[in-house]
Image (cartoon, helix red, strand yellow):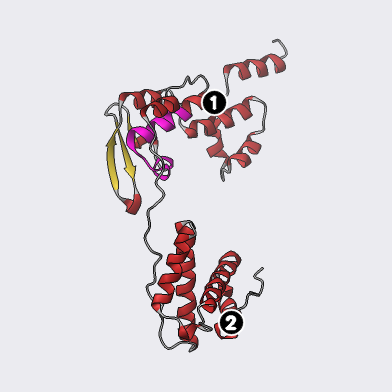
Amino acid sequence: MWRRYRGPVSADWDLSGFASWLAGRSPATRKAYVSDVGAFAEWMARAGVDGPAEVDRMHLRRYLASLGTRRLARATIARKAAALRCYFAWSLRQGHIGSDPARSLRAPAGGGRLPRVLSGGEVSTLLDVPAATPIERRDVAVLELLYAAGLRVSELCGLDRGDIDLRGRTVTVLGKGAKQRRVPIHDTAVAALRAAPTHPHALRHTYATHLLDGGADLRVVQELLGHSSLATTQVYTHVSKERLRAVYDGTHPRA
């Protein structure tokens, strides 16, 4: 729940009215925006400005610059800028101000926090590890593919099996803006991919088959798989020879 802002802010800011207008937003956004505007109002009060009508664009830019000196994350500063744009647009519609000083206000562009570049030795330590179990082979394949093709994690997660051409040593990626690109991958990545566990859907098939092998009722498996038709579930009834032999031996009078 949003709580009333209790800082030393003039009533001219009408933070309660702003909070009420934000009722359609999520509680977290509502609380953050009111807090952000309240903090700005406090900052302006120290400069002798007691209400939004006295704020100009230079005040706003100086405030955002001051936030940068506090080593706040860029995302946090961008959110505060968005809160101020929202507040002053609302103030203009309410008639509290004659013009909107925050129109098209953006957080100042700063140096982004780029990840640290790994050394060649660190890459080797990360990738050149023994992989005995299926999970370890999967993890190595994921890391090799990320490094071999420079993929975003979202691009990796969006890959289908058909997007990877092991024979041609390429991977077809659907990136940002629905832009498709084909990227070469090296032999080490191909080898890691060949050794990874089978396609995820095969695990679903295995799950269903093992349940049936263990004696689960076909209709129970149907519910667990979310099939609307029992006929669909019957695709998974490739019961093992061991299960057939056990049923036969346990039920046939002459077995």
- The residue shown at (56%, 36%) is 233
Left or right of 201, for residue 182: left
Helix, strand or loop for disc 2: helix
Q: Identify which residue, 18 or 232, lies in the foreground.
A: 18
Left or right of 186, for residue 15: right
Front disc: 2 or 1: 2
Disc 2 marks a residue whose amino acid type is Gly
- The residue shown at (42%, 71%) is 62
Disc 1 marks a residue whose amino acid type is His
Left or right of 120, for residue 26: right
**Residue 28, how many percent across, how many down?**
59, 64
| 143 falls in the magenta region | yes
Identify whether 113 is placed above or below 54: above
Compare marks 2 and 1 and give the one earlier in the sequence.
2
Overall secondary structure of the magenta section: helix
Q: Quadrant of residue 27?
A: bottom right
Q: Which mark is residue 17?
A: 2
Residue 146 appears in the figure: yes
Q: CA distance from mark 2 to mark 1?
A: 66 Å
Q: Which mark is residue 98?
A: none
**Residue 206, how many percent across, how many down?**
55, 28
Residue at the far front in the pictured view: 47
**Residue range (magenta):** 139-157
Identify whether 6 is placed above or below 203: below
Say which quadrant the C terminus sits in: top right
